[in-house]
């Protein structure tokens, strides 16, 4: 351990004070494409609005904004600054990525001041770009002499894509639901407006007027009211090219337009209306693979945007709501190899009970082989929580149960928490886990809490039922119960960890909770039920209590069965109860298996082949090296491997002379058992696996006393 003296702590305190002294209202970023200005709060937005120097750079909106309570008299961004003819303000010439966020409640009241170029943006220049933005519930009202008004912008010379608006706009001339005027070379694509439009001349549900510009894959549904050049989609058009665009003739009450095709409400709510004209929808690939649009079946709504983002590594699809989550889980196009997903909100599933896996379920329970569409993409949970997942298969023998049914070889799941899940079945299913039934990919920085209750089953784990992939920095606190006979390979973290032509590695993981197996159960372990065929367990531990019924065997505190597997730098402290082949660390250690630098301390109880560390060793080629168990707490003086020590000896560093206390292990001499150093973050003084103000409080309480603390 590294000693920290007063000087080090003083520097630490100064750094903390420096962090808290930063101006939280400053916009972070540098304005470049790779490091855009980030609007992360309403004060950030206000700074952005107030300073035209931002308007030529790259900017990204990272939060939904509610502008309720603010009334503008002109455009917040790039307003016109003079009543003389022509735009006199600072054009917006940068790139504004709405990041699939929403700006709601925009109010512009120019009924007294008049003026022109009203909208969220007043004037977008030829190099300007606005994308992935929703303007919701806006109310923009000009004077009877106000021109160029739209929910998004009054005037556009640039590029606008994947933007939409709801609300109302009104004025005199060139008024559109989204854009007032789309001028020379202005390009608008994949946009829609559900805005009521009122004025005198050049009025359109989407755009008031077009000149030598392009509009494609757009629609509008709002009412349009005026006198001259009134169109359901576009009011006036001089040289503009309008491609595959539509408006609702029933809701708009307008049957003509200077571009686009009018459709009934029913037709506007049919996917084929749009896909027949080349729109890129989720679930089809003939028109592209960007998955821009989706529509709810049953003629209940108009097309909506699919998940935000493009699905690439740098611009992943984004889940920001329960609605987004449901869209993601119901459409297997999002599960494909090379697709990236990011979760940006917690998801509560308390209102629904599933009978199969939520994502990538098995679709045919008549055979044990997986029959569904695997998840082969990459999901970054960003530390968010999916809570109250409930799966109840009832009397139907559905296998591959969990949030995911099967994770493919190229899949990655990281930074995700599954909390308070409940999985139940009245049958004896295979491959059950809180996160996934089957894993062939990479799982990292994930955790799970909950319970699994089955009649029986095979390959049952708190995180994954069976893993043939890589699992790291994960932990579980799960109670697993099998009511009757014939269950096997059950683990607090992983049920079966097996290397079949790839890799099966568990690294820096731990499990707590309980496992209760029925009669005739086998291969039950606090961390892993069965570890075999070169499966590896490194730097892991379990505090799980493991209990099995009559005639059970191969029961262990860390793993029930270690069959040609490898265990290194690991330990178990939970109590273990079984019939035969019962061990504090491993129940059955067999066939060229190896266990190195590991220990156990839990109470071990059984009838035959019972050992403090290992219940039974089968075969002369299995290795146990530098391993120990506590003969007092285990109640066992013998073991099929390892060396028994007293509790006092187990808390002395000298007992573990050949262990790596520089990198892998830590110990407080004569106070606690060895702990795995790498499972505790740097600065975790109270050993609760979090670095927080409690740790800082320990510093604060003792730094003046000259007490030397240890940084893990």
Image (spheres, grey):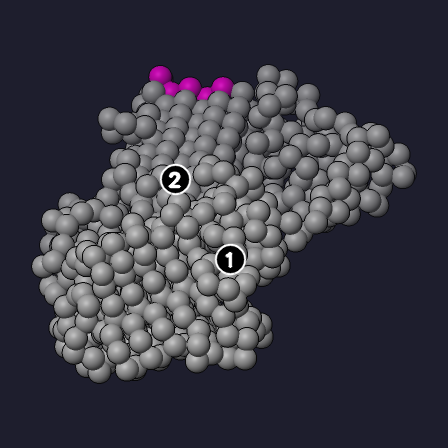
Q: Which residue is mark 1?
A: 88
Residue 295 position, x and y percent, is 22, 65
Residue 657 position, x and y percent, is 63, 18
Res 408 seen here: no
**Along the viewing direction, whichever of 268 and 686 lies nearer the viewer:** 268
Q: Are marks 1 and 2 in contact (CB under 8 Å)?
A: no
Q: Is residue 264 above or below residue 75?
A: below
Of helix, strand and loop, which one carries label 2? loop
Say which of marks 1 and 2 sits in front.
1
Check residue 314 in the rendering and tell me which mark sits there, or answer none: 2
Residue 141 position, x and y percent, is 45, 77
Q: Residue furthest front?
A: 85
Q: Is residue 84 above or below residue 331?
A: below
User: Which image quadrant for residue 251?
Assistant: bottom left
Q: Earlier in the sequence, mark 1 or mark 2?
A: 1
The residue that appears at 71% across and 32% down in the rendered structure is: 711
Q: CA distance from mark 1 to mark 2?
A: 37 Å
**Along the viewing direction, whichever of 488 and 608 lies nearer the viewer:** 488
**Along the viewing direction, whichever of 701 and 399 lies nearer the viewer:** 701
Q: Residue furthest right?
A: 705
User: Which image quadrant for residue 14?
Assistant: top right
Res 46 seen here: yes
Q: Is residue 663 above or below residue 523?
A: above
Which image quadrant: the C terminus?
top right
User: Which image quadrant for residue 553?
Assistant: top left
User: Is residue 5 shown left or right of residue 178?
Assistant: right
Tell me the magenta residue range: 620-625
**Along the viewing direction, whichever of 127 and 685 lies nearer the viewer:** 127
Which image quadrant: the N terminus?
top right
């Amino acid at each position: 351990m590294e000693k920290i003296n007063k000087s080090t702590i003083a520097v630490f305190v100064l750094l903390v004070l420096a962090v808290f002294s930063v101006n939280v209202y400053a916009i972070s970023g540098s304005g470049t494409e790779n490091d855009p200005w980030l609007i992360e709060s309403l004060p950030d937005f206000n700074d952005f609005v107030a300073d035209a120097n931002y308007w030529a750079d790259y900017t990204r909106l990272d939060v939904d904004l509610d502008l309720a309570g603010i009334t503008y008299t002109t455009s917040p961004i790039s307003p016109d600054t003079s009543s003389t003819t022509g735009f006199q303000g600072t054009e917006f010439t940068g790139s504004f990525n709405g990041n699939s966020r929403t700006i709601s409640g925009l109010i512009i009241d120019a009924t007294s001041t008049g003026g022109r170029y009203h909208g969220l943006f007043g004037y977008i220049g030829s190099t300007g770009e606005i994308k992935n933005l929703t303007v919701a519930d806006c109310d923009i009202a000009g004077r009877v002499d106000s021109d160029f008004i739209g929910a998004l912008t009054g005037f556009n010379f640039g590029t606008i894509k994947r933007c939409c608006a709801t609300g109302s706009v009104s004025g005199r001339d060139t008024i559109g639901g989204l854009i007032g005027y789309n001028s020379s070379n202005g390009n608008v694509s994949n946009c829609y407006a559900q805005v009521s439009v009122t004025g005198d001349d050049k009025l359109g549900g989407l755009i008031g007027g077009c000149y030598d510009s392009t509009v494609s894959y757009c629609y509008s549904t709002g009412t349009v009211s005026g006198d001259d050049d009134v169109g359901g989609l576009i009011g006036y058009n001089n040289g503009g090219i309008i491609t595959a665009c539509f408006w609702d003739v029933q809701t708009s009450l307008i049957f003509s337009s200077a571009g686009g095709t009018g459709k009934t409400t029913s037709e506007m709510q049919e996917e084929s209306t749009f896909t027949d004209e080349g729109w890129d929808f989720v679930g089809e690939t003939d028109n592209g693979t960007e998955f821009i649009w989706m529509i709810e079946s049953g003629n209940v709504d108009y097309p909506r945007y699919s998940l935000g983002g493009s699905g690439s590594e740098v611009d992943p699809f984004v889940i920001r709501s329960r609605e987004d989550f449901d869209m993601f889980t119901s459409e297997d196009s999002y599960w494909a190899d090379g697709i990236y997903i990011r979760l940006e909100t917690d998801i509560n599933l308390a209102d629904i009970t599933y009978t199969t896996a939520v994502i990538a379920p098995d679709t045919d329970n008549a055979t044990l082989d997986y029959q569904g569409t695997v998840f082969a993409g990459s999901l970054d949970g960003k530390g968010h929580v999916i809570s109250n997942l409930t799966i109840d298969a009832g009397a139907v023998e559905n296998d591959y149960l969990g949030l995911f049914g099967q994770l493919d070889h190229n899949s990655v799941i990281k930074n995700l928490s599954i909390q308070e899940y409940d999985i139940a079945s009245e049958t004896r299913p295979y491959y059950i886990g809180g996160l996934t039934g089957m894993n062939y990919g990479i799982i990292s920085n994930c955790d799970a809490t909950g319970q699994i209750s089955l009649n029986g089953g095979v390959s049952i784990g708190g995180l994954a039922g069976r893993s043939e992939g890589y699992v790291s920095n994960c932990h579980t606190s799960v109670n697993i119960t099998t009511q009757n006979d014939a269950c096997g390979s059950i683990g607090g973290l992983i049920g079966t960890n097996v290397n079949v032509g790839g890799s099966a590695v568990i690294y820096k993981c731990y499990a707590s909770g309980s496992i209760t197996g029925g009669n005739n159960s086998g291969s039950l372990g606090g961390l892993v039920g069965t570890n075999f065929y070169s499966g590896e367990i490194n730097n892991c531990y379990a505090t799980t209590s493991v209990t099995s019924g009559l005639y059970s065997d191969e029961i262990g505190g860390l793993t029930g069965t270690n069959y040609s597997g490898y265990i290194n730098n690991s330990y178990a402290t939970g109590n273990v109860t079984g019939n035969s082949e019962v061990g504090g660390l491993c129940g059955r250690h067999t066939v060229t298996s190896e266990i190195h630098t590991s220990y156990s301390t839990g109470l071990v109880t059984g009838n035959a082949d019972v050992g403090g560390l290992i219940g039974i060793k089968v075969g002369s080629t299995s290795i146990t090296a530098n391993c120990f168990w506590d003969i007092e707490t285990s109640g066992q003086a013998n073991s099929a491997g390892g060396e028994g020590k007293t509790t006092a000896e187990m808390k002395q560093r000298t007992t573990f002379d050949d262990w790596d206390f520089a990198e892998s292990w830590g110990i407080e001499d004569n106070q606690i058992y060895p702990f795995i150093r790498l499972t505790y973050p740097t600065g975790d003084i109270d050993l609760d696996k979090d670095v927080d103000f409690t740790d800082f409080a320990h510093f604060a309480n003792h730094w003046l006393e000259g007490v030397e603390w240890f940084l893990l």
